[in-house]
Amino acid sequence: DGGITQSPKYLFRKEGQNVTLSCEQNLNHDAMYWYRQDPGQGLRLIYYSQIVNDFQKGDIAEGYSVSREKKESFPLTVTSAQKNPTAFYLCATTGQASSKPYYEQYFGPGTRLTVT
Amino acid sequence: DQQVKQNSPSLSVQEGRISILNCDYTNSMFDYFLWYKKYPAEGPTFLISISSIKDKNEDGRFTVFLNKSAKHLSLHIVPSQPGDSAVYFCAASARGTYKYIFGTGTRLKVLA
């Protein structure tokens, strides 16, 4: 069953602690992304990776870090430097749309992180 | 600077009628546009897309129209059903960039 897995669904942490969110995919897609969604706002890009061992900052990378050691995995660490970490985090991958020259983006189910 | 805008935060439509969701963009380099549907606490699901070489794409009850000169696209849902109630995001991408820019979403409520 192909797809994108994010775990856990809900995560609670104390302020000042780092926390790592998991994202795994078996779609064999090269590109992976992390977005953040806040109430009433759209999806904001945190980091993305086009290939293994390479990643780029998105629009709101401060306070976050990522790694891409394997094609299937793109974990996101929310550090204590992130001022407002409570949010809904979405992982996505990009794969070529069937018989089309364009790429569609697919999303995981998300992780709701609450920091108190 | 918001490159993709959805100016209507919410929309209510009667069941069976047409829902029209709008999206504007500013970057003329965008050549691929997508619509996503999102329920609370879930990831967005892909609905329909359109490339800049077309001005219309249809899939069942969903049709997307693209007006390149106006830098405007719209999603039509006909007929609207209560299960269509969700937040709809439009997104845009430029070939080769691997980046997708999302609008802020429109919450659609279909009234039974």
Image (spheres, coloured by chain):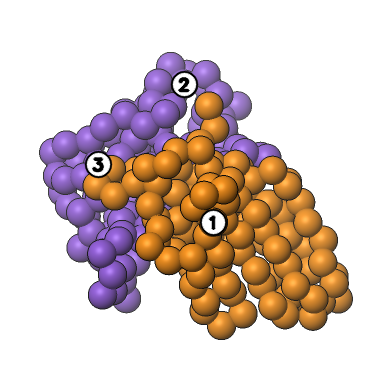
Asked if marks 2 and 3 fall on the same chain, the answer is yes
Q: Is residue B65 above or below residue B93?
A: below
**Quadrant assignment for the N terminus of chain A:** bottom left
Q: Amino acid at mark 1?
A: Asn
The image's mark for residue B67 is 1
Residue B45 drawn at (x, y percent): 50, 64
**Quadrant assignment for the C terminus of chain A:** top right
The front one of B8 and B110 is B8
Look at mark 2 in the image and give the residue it sits on. A82
Callout 2: chain:
A
The front one of A63 and B67 is B67
Residue A91 drawn at (x, y percent): 39, 49
Q: What's the CA distance linking mark 1 and mark 3?
A: 31 Å
Chain B image colour: orange
Q: Amino acid at mark 2?
A: Gln
Mark 2: secondary structure: loop
Contact check, label 1 and label 3, Cβ < 8 Å: no
Contact check, label 2 and label 1, Cβ < 8 Å: no
Look at mark 3 in the image and give the residue it sits on. A49
Mark 3: secondary structure: strand
Residue A7 drawn at (x, y percent): 41, 52
Mark 1: secondary structure: strand
Callout 3: chain:
A
